[in-house]
Image (cartoon, rainbow, N blue to C red):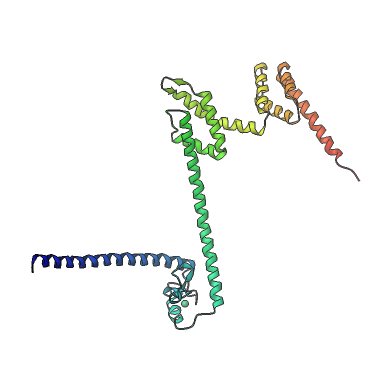
């Protein structure tokens, strides 16, 4: 054998080995695929059919279970979970000799399977949806945290801060929280040589929730700012004041159309808490009574 012949023979042998290797690999891959698929599908179908032969009703482990194709593979039936049914070995083998059972029964069975499958898919979709919502919330929180860092250069929220942000995100809209962050940064930050001071940043962060709350109240009750202002006047002038009750009486009076200017002037002239409280309660009683009378007039007797 000359040198060329030697190489040619070696090359042919190498090619053969290589082809055997490739075929073996692809065989292994296809076997693994078929095996993996069939185990998964077998389990799904058996589970769906409660490990019971759908022809005779016998259960595992009394009988050996197999998968049967509703539409036979020879007629194009797919390896699809909808085309598969649990059968015991006896029914499966016997069935291959006899003609297919009443097609109405099979159609009904197939419809049941499709509905079951649809329901299963919908449950999975709902889980995905819920998961998506959770992911979305996380994304919103992280965006808000970034927004905070932008307003407060050099600082970021720690684990507790993120927790607080998550709570806020449950109670308020994103734009409400963003507005509150902006207001807190504008009002409470104090700047040193290296940007905002740590104390002022902490103070600003602590205010964000409160600002969200106040702004929500202002939105629900457009007069709340003025009411707070009038209560401030009372606080400055009177030696005693029940702040909660004052707020409640003022809100009630305004809801009954009390004039805000008159309330403010009254607060500036009143001498003590009892006097102020009685005046407000009188006003509320009078105007609530008017409402009651109107209601009584609305009823005819006989
Ligand atoms: Zn059976």
Residue 11, image x and y in percent? 17, 65
Q: Residue at x 18, y 65 (%)?
A: 14
Q: From what the image shows, is residue 146 above or below residue 102? A: above
Outermost residue toward the left? 2
232 lies left or right of 263:
left
Q: Residue at x 39, y 67 (%)?
A: 38
273 lies left or right of 62:
right
**Nearer to me, 185 or 253:** 185
**Nearer to me, 222 or 264:** 222
Outermost residue toward the bottom? 98
Counting labels gives 0
**Nearer to me, 151 or 299:** 151
Residue 106, image x and y in percent? 53, 75
Outermost residue toward the right? 302
Q: Residue at x 46, y 69 (%)?
A: 51
Q: Residue at x 48, y 32 (%)?
A: 148
**Nearer to me, 88 or 176:** 176
Q: Quadrant of residue 40?
A: bottom left
Q: Quadrant of residue 92?
A: bottom left
Q: From what the image shows, is residue 141 above or below residue 235? A: below
Residue 59, image x and y in percent? 46, 73
Q: From what the image shows, is residue 33 above or below residue 197? A: below
Residue 55, image x and y in percent? 50, 76
Q: Quadrant of residue 155?
A: top left
Quarter occupied by the N terminus = bottom left
């Amino acid at each position: 054998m000359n040198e060329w012949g030697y190489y040619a023979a070696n090359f042919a042998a190498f090619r053969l080995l290589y082809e055997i290797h490739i075929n073996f690999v692809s065989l292994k891959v296809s076997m693994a695929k078929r095996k993996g698929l069939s185990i998964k599908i077998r389990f799904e179908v058996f589970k769906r059919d409660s490990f019971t032969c759908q022809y005779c009703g016998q259960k595992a482990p009394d009988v050996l279970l197999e998968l049967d194709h509703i539409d036979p593979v020879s007629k194009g039936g797919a390896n699809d979970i909808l085309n598969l049914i649990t059968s015991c070995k006896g029914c499966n083998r016997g069935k291959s000799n006899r003609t297919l059972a009443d097609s109405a029964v099979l159609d009904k069975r197939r419809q049941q399977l499709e509905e079951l499958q649809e329901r299963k898919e919908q449950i999975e979709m709902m889980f995905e949806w819920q998961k998506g919502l959770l992911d979305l919330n996380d994304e919103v929180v992280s965006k808000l945290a970034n927004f905070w860092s932008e307003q407060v250069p050099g600082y970021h929220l720690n684990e507790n801060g993120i927790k607080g942000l998550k709570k806020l995100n449950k109670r308020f809209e994103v734009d409400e929280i963003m507005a509150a962050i902006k207001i807190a940064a504008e009002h409470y930050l104090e700047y040193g040589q290296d940007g905002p001071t740590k104390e002022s940043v902490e103070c600003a962060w602590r205010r964000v929730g409160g600002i969200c709350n106040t702004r929500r109240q202002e939105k629900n009750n457009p007069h709340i700012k003025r009411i707070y202002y009038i209560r401030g006047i009372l606080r400055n002038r009177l030696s005693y004041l029940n702040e909660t009750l004052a707020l409640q009486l003022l809100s009630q009076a305004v809801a009954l159309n009390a004039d805000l200017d008159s309330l403010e002037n009254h607060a500036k002239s009143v001498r003590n808490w009892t006097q102020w409280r009685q005046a407000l309660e009188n006003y509320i009683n009078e105007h609530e009574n008017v409402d009651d009378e109107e209601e009584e007039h609305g009823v005819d007797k006989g």
